Amino acid sequence: MFNSLQGIISEKQGDTVRLITHGIEWDIAVPVIDAELLAPVGQEARIFVWLYHKEDMLRLFGFADESRRETFLALLKVEGIGPRGALKIMGGISQKELEQALEHEDISRLEAVPGLGKKTAQKMILSLKGKLVSAQSTHVLNHPYPELFEALITMGYDRKSVEETLKAVAKQPDTEEALFKRAIVALSTRQ
């Protein structure tokens, strides 16, 4: 499937960017924040994309980087949030602010995003707390066991629990495989 499109930006209008690649002009829906992050009109840009397809519609959604696309896909997993809603949410709050609001369970900050109510904000916190990581985050790279850390996050455990658990199990030096097994047992008993 598509990963990204690279070409010349021919137009920017609110939450739409048009990109020309090899004679084809793509109409791409983007969060307003991402439109601002992309190169100006007339310059080359790379847009990470996701194709939405339904029986009667195809629509490309685009993002300034892969972490923004991952955030969009994570938002789609929250009950009641569709592609247009996720786009609107991402256009109303920066990546860093979103991560902080979710991590600190800041419902009032999430409710300040246009079109986002209290119930949806609560669902977002329940579904996404500790699971969003921005491209700028170097926390995983600085972790003593980055592969274990990333593997446990990918399995669905939240960042804070993984971090605490890895610190606890790493007190007893062992192979990464043994640490991984101990971490899974410890995390499963926390839940």
Image (cartoon, rainbow, N blue to C red):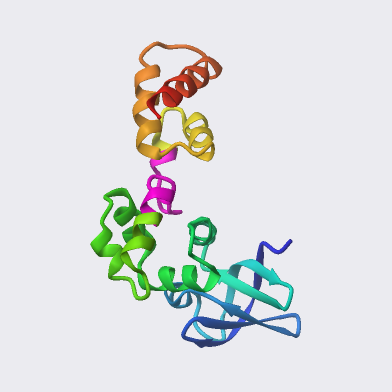
Left or right: residue 113 compared with residue 180: left
Could you tell me which residue is drawn at 41 percent across and 22 percent down?
A: 189
Could you tell me which residue is drawn at 44 percent across and 77 percent down?
A: 32
Can you give x and y, in whole percent of width and height, for residue 155 in the image? 53, 36
Could you tell me which residue is drawn at 67 percent across and 62 percent down?
A: 3
Left or right: residue 28 compared with residue 81: right
Can you give x and y, in whole percent of width and height, for residue 82 in the image? 53, 67
* Quarter of the figure with the N terminus: bottom right
- With respect to residue 83, does 165 lie above or below? above
Q: Give 34 or 20, whichever is nearer the viewer.
A: 34
- With respect to residue 55, does 80 lie above or below? above
Can you give x and y, in whole percent of width and height, for residue 26 in the image? 67, 81
Q: What stretch is highlighted in magenta?
A: 124-140
Left or right: residue 171 compared with residue 65: left
Which corner quadrant of the image does residue 161 belong to? top left
Could you tell me which residue is drawn at 31 percent across and 49 percent down?
A: 103
- Residue 130 colored in magenta in the image: yes
